[in-house]
Amino acid sequence: MEELAERGTRFPVVIFGPEGCGKTAFLRQAAYMLKELGYEVFYLHPLDRVFLAEVDDVDVKTFFLELARKTLEDEKWGRMALAVFDLVRELLKRRKRKVAVIADDVFQAIGLEKAAAYVKGLLNMIEHPIHEYENIVVLMATSEGVTRGEIGRHRWARLMPMWNMAKEGFRELYDKMPGPKPPFEEAWRLTGGNPDALARLYEAGWSVEEVVDGLVRQKKLSAFVRGLSMEERRWLLETVEDPDTLYVRERIPLMDRLVEMNLLVDEMYPRKPRHWIDQPPPEKDLELGIGKKAAWHTPIHREAVKRALQEWL
């Protein structure tokens, strides 16, 4: 964050990664750190109904809070996302500043079909400002595989992947979980370091069966499998063992559906730290569902798909 604060972001940075890997936690920490580093910060997270303006201009902050109040009342979430352009312009009109816009899952608020246009608007704010600025940082996050694909078709943002927690950090989190719990290696094997998966297991009394069944229902995996041909089910079964088996021309549509359902991450980046937020995943770890080119969000996502397939085997 200190490096980003020092140089700003040449393009909006769109962070993607598995569900529950820690993108929101990262952005919240980023908002706090950027404020400490002298930035005026707008933070938007419509799904959590959280809108914050850490700015020193009373008029702009008052206007922001009034918009937030109306939005929380009528739930027209796109209003806040679009208002950022006017709010930043108003801040910079008054004096040259360092400004940060941090937006978490706003694409669902404005509509996925408008995602690319929204990112282009943020890029224009950086490249063609009406008023001079000292520096700008734009950070966004999405778990929507479809949105990432739409944004990636253009050169308007820098896409950066984030993975589940590295083993050392995950052990610290595991050690803080109270009460009886399975051995650490078992928790690691079940979650792949995903903090949300660990929380779900804890809330379910460490019942893997309950968590997997819940995911099957949430993702409507039984209906998904039922709609596949026998050949596609065989492909999916192979994908459970190794996600890289999807990289065959006739299997790409199946991979796209798994990405759309937020079960799989495709196009895994090279495992060089400069490409990743925090520590990259291993080059390949089939026990955790990680291939060289594609990976399951977590071992539990993979297990849920396997469970849905069982009635057809």
Image (cartoon, grey):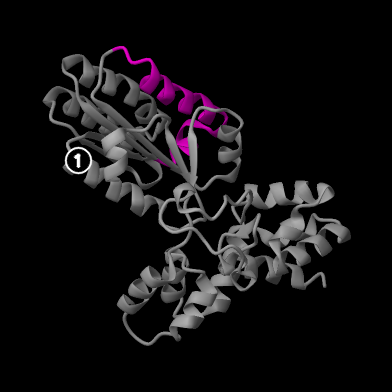
Q: Position of residue 126 (x, y in %)?
A: 37, 23
Report the number of discs.
1
Residue highlighted by disc 1: 35
Query: Which stretch is magenta?
Result: 104-130
Residue 313 magenta-highlighted: no
- On the picture, is 79 further left or further right than 2? right
> In front: 213, or 188?
188
- On the picture, is 232 further left or further right than 81? right
Residue at image x 28%, y 33%?
Answer: 68
Q: Quadrant of the C terminus?
A: bottom right
Residue type, mark 1 in image: Lys
Rendered position, 82 above or below 38: above
Q: Secondary structure at mark 1?
A: helix
Residue at image x 76%, y 59%?
Answer: 245
Residue at image x 87%, y 59%?
Answer: 231
Report the magenta stretch's main SS: helix
> In front: 180, or 17?
17
